[in-house]
Image: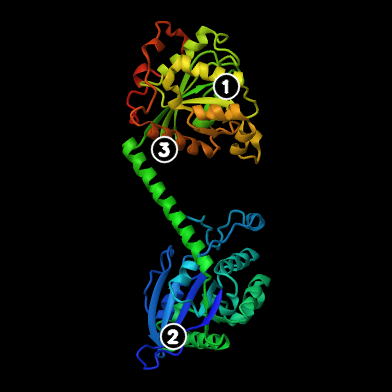
Amino acid sequence: MAAVSSASDTGDPRGRQPPERRLLILGGPQCGKTSTVNTILGDEVFDAGTETTHSNVGHTEMYGRRVTVVDTPPWTIPADPEDDAEENNDNAGAESDSPPRAPPSLDSEGPCMGAILCPPGPHVILLVVSVTQPFTDTHRRAADEQLGALGGGTWRYSMVLFTGVDKLPKGVFIEEHISNTGEALQWLVERCGSRYHAFDNTRKETEDNTQVPELMEKVEEMITDNQGWYFEVNELILLEEEQARRALEEERMRMEEHARQREQMIGGPPRELRLLLLGWKGVGKSSVGNSILGRRYFESGQETDLCLRRQALVSGRRVTIVDTPGWDWFSVRRTPKRIRQESQRGAALLRPGPHTLLLVLPVVSSLTARKRRTLLAHLEALFGDDACLHTMVLFSCGDWLGCTPIEEHILRGGRELQRLLEYCGNYYHVLDSKTPGKDRSVSVLLDKIEEMIRENGDKAFLPIQVEWLSEESSYSSDNTEPEDDCRGCQLQ
């Protein structure tokens, strides 16, 4: 932080430019910041009926001075588990008066951006607090964090501005409200050097409205106490803020491009994905299928003998899955011919071909060189050399990982596991198959599958081969009529 004397404090010596006062407005959700800015500016400059998503600057002249006011997006009030538990217990079934806590978005800005918009820095930082909302220790920490984001020395330039004072009970003054609200609000006022002011934003049209002149008098007192200095954001903090903004912008552009490409690729809902579950015996393929589809369509806990196809709407996609019998762990030859044929018929049930071969691998099993070679031998013998383009490793039993990231598990899994993932183009995902329909990572899995389809270009799916179709069709089981299978897929 650099506190420097403002060149505009005394104005141009020839009187061409009036002296300037710069005010930065900060506060939480629905605290009345925008209405306060409009009250200070004396006009409805900004729309107070919508949430502020980007910092805005307003200018006016009053009492021979040019006043710049910067409105900023609300800071985030983090959820407090203890507070939430108390509210749930005390107000079960009742609506809360507190504003909803919205999660941070890609459009969120920090307070540094507001400071940048009133160069070379604000004379006063007004912390807006509504008297109609509770001010808890969670709110105190949020305020402390926001001021800390600007750098050191901010509190000497800060003042609490209370809004909604017309909502106070008759005969209750703001001093009594501060005393009765609790230690968190008292801490905030004391941290600001006991500087505070109260606004009734409904009175800005009245002739006897003295609240803005009184506020500007307090602003002048603060500038005098600070010897004409203003707050300037540290250049390093500005650099970090700019880097963060660039990263957010790049992420936003990436998401928009992803959505645009998906729309072009799919052509409109419902989009369809065809998935074939493959792997050893007993690795949880049926449970994985249930997790993806959100219901117990496949019988888990017993050996799968015949291919079974099921379909459901999942995260806006029509997902078709075929479960297949399991392979031998150590040898293709030890996998019965009937089972090998059944795997191929499973692919044939996904006409004109599966988009993705989901190779199910339990996180609790180790992968040796022999096991890896056996898996790849099954894939290439049954589905050809292009199988690698359409294969994704899907780790089952993800609940066994606990707090361990899957990437750390892969590193611990050794070179054989890493070689398997390299064969699959490093496409992998992990699922907790114990809670069908409740695993949020299913949507992420489908996103990865669509990314794989996009990467494969004109090879979006693995085409059905003639040799996969046999006159011995009695091995396959499906409750769907042949004319209902996946010929109309828009991802072809």
Question: Height in image: 261 above or below 362?
Answer: below
Query: Circles 3 and 1: CB distance less than 8 Å?
Result: no
Residue at image location 37% in from the left, 44% down from the top: 259
Q: Name the kind of residue labelled 3 in the image.
A: Gly
Residue 329, image quadrant: top right
Q: Crowdedness of circle 1 by 10 Å Cα count: few (<14), some, many (20+)?
A: some
Of marks 3 and 1, the one in the foreground: 1
Position of residue 111 measured from the top left corner of the image (x, y, whole percent) = 50, 67
- Above or below, 249 against 314 in this view is below
Provide the residue designation for mark 2: 8
Helix or strand or loop: what does disc 1 sit on? helix
| Residue, far top | 471
Instruction: Report if residue 290 is visible in the image.
Output: no
What percent of the width, then of the height, locates residue 429? 53, 34
The quarter in which the N terminus is drawn is: bottom right
Q: Residue at x 44, y 85 (%)?
A: 8
The residue carrying pointer 3 sits among few (fewer than 14), some (14 to 19) or many (20 or more) residues within 10 Å by Cα, namely: few
Which amino acid type is shown beneath numbered disc 1?
Arg
Q: CA distance from mark 2 to mark 3?
A: 57 Å
| Mark 2, secondary structure of its residue | loop
Percent position of residue 324, x then y: 51, 18
The residue labelled by disc 1 is 372
Between the residue at mark 3 and the residue at mark 1, the CA separation in whole angstroms equals 35 Å
- Residue denoted by label 3: 316
